[in-house]
Amino acid sequence: MRWRDRYGIRRLRGPKVAKFDREATDADIEALIAFARSRRGVEFYVEPETFATDTTAVAVADDGEWTRRRVGAPAVIRKVARDLALPVYDVQLTGYPQRMRAYNERRRREEGLE
């Protein structure tokens, strides 16, 4: 069964697909949209495709909470970000925000105490 390409994943990605990874789906994009709509100050960070992984995007909220999903191509997440009026950055140029690292550190400390 073929899934609908509501977000233009196939059209914007083109013919190139990573060899070991599954392709991005509408559910991946919808998860990023749901995360962005349910949190404040969300920014998207595009991660490049690798040999084993399709292009991904990390959505980072104001408090540092984050989620990563496949997007198929940078153009897909740029379109989603534009539609949501949210910023999108190339992680290779900007790196990850400090609040994301602080969130990860808080989580590690909390898990160690329990």
Image (cartoon, rainbow, N blue to C red):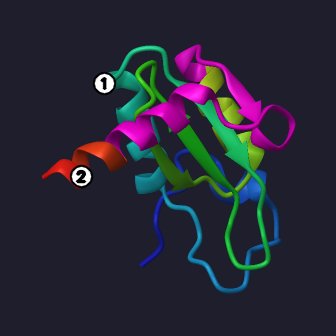
Q: Position of residue 40 (x, y in %)?
A: 39, 15
Residue hosting label 1: 38
| Vertical comparison of 87 with 105: above or below | above
Q: Residues within 10 Å of mark 1 (few under 14, many from 20)?
A: few
Query: Is the residue 30 above or below the residue 1 in the image?
Result: above
Residue 73 lies in the magenta stretch = no
The prevailing secondary structure element of the residues shown in magenta is helix
Residue type at mark 2 is: Glu
Closer to the camera in the image, 39 or 65: 65
Horizontally, residue 36 falls left or right of residue 9, namely left
Label 2: few (<14), some (14–19) or many (≥20) C-alpha neighbours in 10 Å: few
Amino acid type at circle 1 is Ser
Horizontally, residue 9 falls left or right of residue 25, namely right
> Which sits earlier in the primary sequence, circle 2 or circle 1?
1
What whole-number distance in Å separates the C-alpha atoms at marks 2 and 1?
24 Å
Instruction: Name the spot of residue 67 as percent of width and height, x first.
Output: 45, 45
Residue pictured at 82% horizontal, 70% vertical: 15
Q: Position of residue 84 (x, y in %)?
A: 53, 19
Tell me if 61 is positioned left or right of 87 in this view.
left
The residue to which callout 2 is attached is 111
Is residue 95 in the magenta section? yes
Above or below residue 114? Residue 44 is above
24 horizontally vs 4: left or right? right
Picture quadrant of residue 98: top right
Q: What residue sits 70% from the left and 43% below the top? A: 46
Instruction: Give the extent of the magenta segment.
Output: 83-107
